[in-house]
Amino acid sequence: MKTLALLLLLASSVAAQSLERRVAAAPDGSVRFSFAAKPGVYGNGRNMISWDCDKGNCHNRQVDNYSDGDRDDWNMPCDSGPVRVVLTKRGANITDLRVYVGGEWRPNISATDLGTVGTKDAASYLLALAVKDESRASEKAIFPAVLADSVTIWPDLLKIAKADNISRKVKRSAVFWLGQAAGDAATRGLTELVDDGSADHEVRETAVFALSQRPHDEGVPALIRIVRGNKDPDLRRKAIFWLGQSDDPRALSLFEELLTRP
């Protein structure tokens, strides 16, 4: 029932349906579209995307090794956008997805270019694609949705993370990007997910890791609460491990307390 409710919620977006119809009407092969990147997102137009960038410093970066056969998709300048998505379409199915930031499309007569779309349209379509869970495109669809400008997606990511009948990979991807992209509200949601004994154990472990990636003022207190109160010893050990990587004095105080406890 959770999955059905999630699908109905995402399907209710007129924007997502509009872009979905355009993709469905395209011939098989590569289908492209672009949209505005949020501030702090940069890329080289090819295989590198950075986010959380400020004054030349980027806290996160993803580098993908795409095959030589993909080179027709881009030129190489490095800048702050747009986000460029390439879908591989086979009949009614999207079998793969690639994402770039920056650069510009090279002419390709075999590709269908849908042009620039709105960020809400793009994010809604990509999240709907993620929950379809038909191929590796589902897991990969969450990343470009996170990069969309002026769109709040963490409530949908929480729903994906908690939904039934969605693959572990997709759910773990949602949890990871919650930790990377959201603020206080998502941190609370991640803590609730860790505490949810009915959730998949690996997904809960990913939530612990996601909390470790949050700013220290958010993540460290949440990890300490897990160590103090969670009933799962493995999750407590995971939280202790990530606290040990935090170089935070609150973590040291907790370790001292645990080691000197009678």
Image (cartoon, grey):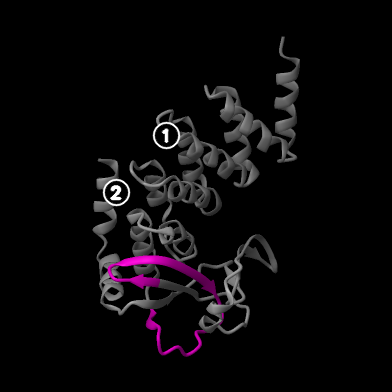
Task: State the quadrant of the C terminus.
Answer: top right
Image spot of residue 139 (x, y percent)? 45, 56
Q: Is residue 99 above or below residue 248?
A: below
Q: Which of label 1 and label 2 is nearer to you?
A: 1
Query: Helix, strand, or loop for circle 2?
Result: helix
Quadrant in the picture for residue 78: bottom right
Q: Is residue 204 above or below residue 58?
A: above
Image spot of residue 60 (x, y percent)? 63, 59
Q: Which of marks 2 and 1 precedes in the sequence?
A: 2
Which residue does the image show at 52% across and 54% down from the upper left?
Answer: 181
Q: Residues within 10 Å of mark 2 (few under 14, many from 20)?
A: some
Q: Which residue is mark 1?
A: 199
> What is the distance, in whole Å, between disc 1 and disc 2 at their CAs?
16 Å
Total labels drawn: 2
Q: Does the segment drawn in magenta span residue 156?
A: no
Q: Is residue 236 above or below residue 4?
A: above
Q: Which residue is mark 2?
A: 6
Q: As rendered, which of 179 and 202 lies closer to the eye?
A: 202
Which residue does the image show at 45% across and 72% down from the upper left?
Answer: 85
Image spot of residue 1 (x, y percent)? 25, 40
Q: Does the segment drawn in magenta span residue 113?
A: yes
As drawn, is 217 to the left or to the right of 31? right
User: Which of the numbered marks, if any, corresponds to residue 215?
Assistant: none
As drawn, is 120 to the left or to the right of 176? left
Q: As rendered, which of 110 and 141 lies closer to the eye?
A: 110
Bounds of the magenta span?
A: 88-116
Most extreme residue toward the top, as rendered?
262
Query: Helix, strand, or loop for circle 1?
Result: loop
